[in-house]
Amino acid sequence: MNTSSQIAIIVYPGSNCDRDCERAFKDIFDIDLLRVWHTELSLPKVRGLILPGGFSYGDYLRSGALASFSPIMNAIREHAKKGGSILGICNGFQILTESRLLPGTLLRNSQNQFICKKTKLISSKKDSLWNKVVSEKVLNIPVAHKDGRYYLDENGLKNLEDNDQILLTYENNPNGSVNDIAGVSSLCGNILGMMPHPERAALSNRQASTDGRKILEYFLSRAL
Amino acid sequence: MKSRKEYGKIFPPHKLQRNHVAMKYKIDVAFKKEILDPEARAVEQSLRKKGFLSIKNITIAKTFFLELEDKNTLEDIENLARNYLTNPLSETYVIQKLDTEPSV
């Protein structure tokens, strides 16, 4: 199957991990990502979408808020409604929570500092495909964010746990996230959001870990 | 990819008519009580170190001032405040209508 151009990446003003994602998908899976600018009103025919990390709209108002009002958002909602896969990384995760496609919100880190460091993540989803693809229990993937403190009220957290929506938790919580949550999925599992950067732990020749590949693989196996 | 010119068409620069009597609103947005605001805590700690020992519970809020044309109803403002200016999970808002004097 020709998998070229079946995955698109949305580029916002201030996105800065879009090229890293493109490089990772090209080098590992030989997939060319289609770049879609945020002012587009429709998406090309794709099976998966990536919302990259960065500082869309300079994090004005709230991180990801202005991006969630951008023209492409309706098309993203349509894609999600039809069951299409979406992977939001870092700022992409913030955009997904701001647009209510994922539950919760991301607040300023509890120590009020930007954190850029390697973290150990514990895989906590029980879904069989997840366990098959993300075979290891502990993944080494770095984080880089200032607004990464995941927050959700108690009812919401209970729903997350009951519906197996927690993807990853931190082994040593770096930012004060509630229940150490680092990444969550939507109820149907087609939308994934995480603060750590899997694309920064993917290339064996230049990155310290390749555990992020498993996350990208899981996204692809759901999308394609 | 769209050019800068086309982008301007989607988000036209906002121009208020000078002679139009507008509704004025003030919307305060603050974190809910249970939400930790590390910035406010840092300010508080620093002030206490400076000797303001009786200071406690500092909160920092954002204020939006806006002018609208008459046709906008209170529901519009509520919608704006609830769904755009705040994140309902972590923030609350207070809307206040301000006096408008007819401009010359």
Image (cartoon, coloured by chain):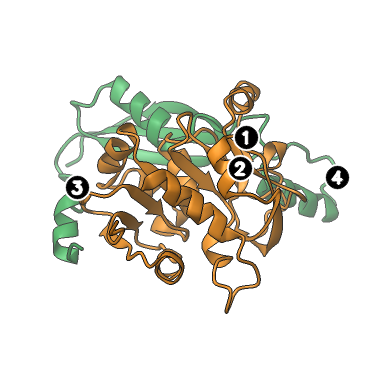
Chain colours: A orange, B green
- Which residue, given by chain and number where applicable, does mark 1 sit on? A126
Alpha-carbon span between mark 4 and mark 1: 50 Å
Q: Amino acid at mark 3?
A: Leu
Q: Amino acid at mark 2?
A: Asn
Q: Residues within 10 Å of mark 1 (few under 14, many from 20)?
A: few
- Residue nearest the viewer, comparing B63 with A65: A65
Which circle, 3 or 1, is nearer the viewer?
A: 1
Protein chain holding label 2? A
Q: Residues within 10 Å of mark 2 (few under 14, many from 20)?
A: some
Alpha-carbon span between mark 3 and mark 1: 36 Å
**Is residue A171 positioned above or below B80 on the image?**
below
Q: Could you confirm whether marks 4 and 1 are on the same chain?
A: no
- Which residue, given by chain and number where applicable, does mark 2 sit on? A131
- Which residue, given by chain and number where applicable, does mark 4 sit on? B53
Which circle, 3 or 2, is nearer the viewer?
A: 2
As helix, strand or loop, the secondary structure at mark 2 comes to: helix
Which circle, 4 or 1, is nearer the viewer?
A: 1
Protein chain holding label 4? B
As helix, strand or loop, the secondary structure at mark 1 comes to: loop
In the image, taking residue A190 as reference, residue A139 lies left or right, namely: right
x, y percent for residue A122? 70, 47
Q: Amino acid at mark 4?
A: Leu
Alpha-carbon span between mark 2 and mark 1: 7 Å
- Which residue, given by chain and number where applicable, does mark 3 sit on? A41
Protein chain holding label 3? A
Which circle, 4 or 2, is nearer the viewer?
A: 2
